[in-house]
Amino acid sequence: MEPFMENLRASLRLSYGQKLFLLATVPLVLSVALITWIVANQSRALADREIRALETQLIDAKREELQNYLSIARTAFVNIYGRAAPDDEAAKLEVTRILSAMLYGQDGYFFVFDYDGRNLVAPRQTNLIGQNWSGLDDIDGVPITDEIIRLARTGGGYHEFQWPKPTTRETAPMIVYVNGLQDWRWAIGTGIFVDDVRETVAAARADVESRIQQTTFYILLITIAALLAVFLTGIVLNIRERRLADAKLKELTERIIDTQEEERGRVARELHDGISQILVSVRYALELARRRITSGDVRAGASLDKGIDALGGAIGEVRRISRDLRPGVLDDLGLAPALQSLIDDFSARTGITVDFETVVFRGRLDEDARIALYRVAQEAFTNIERHAEATQVSMALKGTAKGGIMRITDNGRGLTRRSSGGLGLRNMSERMEQLGGTFRVMASQNGTTIEARVPLSHMLPPDTSARKLDNTA
């Protein structure tokens, strides 16, 4: 028995080479596993934010289309409605005929319900006409007719529900925009199916997940290759050569980090490609122009102009997103010129006047501070453009005895539609926290002011070279 136990202990005793192998491989496996987990979670978080932003952007584009379509329809019958009395049945019949003839796309049409729930116009689904549809719900129990009538009574709005497509009879999510003709007690609206948006978002998520799995697979391959290299070199190398192995391990870690950054860039480019969905609105405008040209309608040129303007806007948006990822002027000229370029683009795009004030710093900002302040300004202008409804903006950038300070003020709606817990404000606050600085938001009914402060630890000594010191270096 004792010889057996002795042999067992001898077989379990690790040799020097095995100890060296374990010493090298265990930290490597743990670090790679941790890095893989971080890469996957960071990539998913980034992709999720971008995809949510993409979905919101596409849905907003669809809603804007609906408003344009309904505006076109109202233009077609506004003279008839304006001259008619509330009980003018001939005028009502003429308006229903006009709306019934206004079709667009494969599934687009206009519908009309009276306030009692009776359908008056449904050219692609004529089985609805003449029947009372009060209390109608979709397959998920969402009220349809009653909500449409409620929106019409209260001035109009959007509503989303499940509805069968006229062409395929398949049920799909649909967004409608409704207005009311109060004199006639009519709810008039049009809708657009958004299943293509949902499919685009789902495809983007699937693509991101596939790329994350692919990246994980590459990391595992690199790890296996590294483990084999460590095992082979551990047999023949002595203690003196362990420094070389450490250097290789450090190089491997840097390669993994580079792989992570490359993957993020690729995910960003894929999401940018999805911006093409915005061009759907251009297609509808051009289709309308084609129909008007065919029918000899003099408004065909206006439709073409609208399509061209929308196309130019989409192209500009793609360029803006690409430029926002890393503005070259920030590296080449410094913070103040980069902010001036940002202001010029903002003013040209929105027509809002921006008063920019800056003074020469006694010390220069380091790279981290420049990037952080630029991103804060970028996020602030985005919020002003989307939510503030401001007409004037002022911006100040200067140095103080305690560091650098940037202040942006607008005369918009305050935070009534920009919650203090929003993602954009949280991102700005986190950027300042990473620098050890402070971020404040001061809101009132007269507007909003944001203030970002950078501590002295991120101020470099003054440049004593022959070059002139710019506003931020």
Image (spheres, helix red, strand yellow):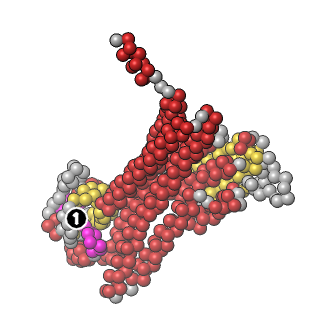
Q: Is residue 328 above or below residue 419?
A: below
Specify whether residue 116 is painted magenta.
yes
Q: Residue at left 27%, top 55%?
A: 161
The range drawn in magenta is 103-119
User: Mark 1 belongs to which amino acid?
Assistant: Lys
Residue 25: x and y in percent read 50, 35
Taking the image as shown, residue 47 lies to the left or right of residue 148, namely: right
Element under disc 1: loop
Q: Is residue 144 left or right of residue 360?
A: left
Which residue ends up furthest to the bottom in the rendered image? Answer: 296
Residue situated furthest front in the rendering: 3
Q: Is residue 345 above or below residue 267?
A: below
Can the viewer see residue 386 in this picture? yes
Q: Main secondary structure of the magenta part?
A: loop
Q: Which residue position holds label 1?
A: 165
**Where is residue 337, by image quadrant?**
bottom right
Residue 32 visible: no
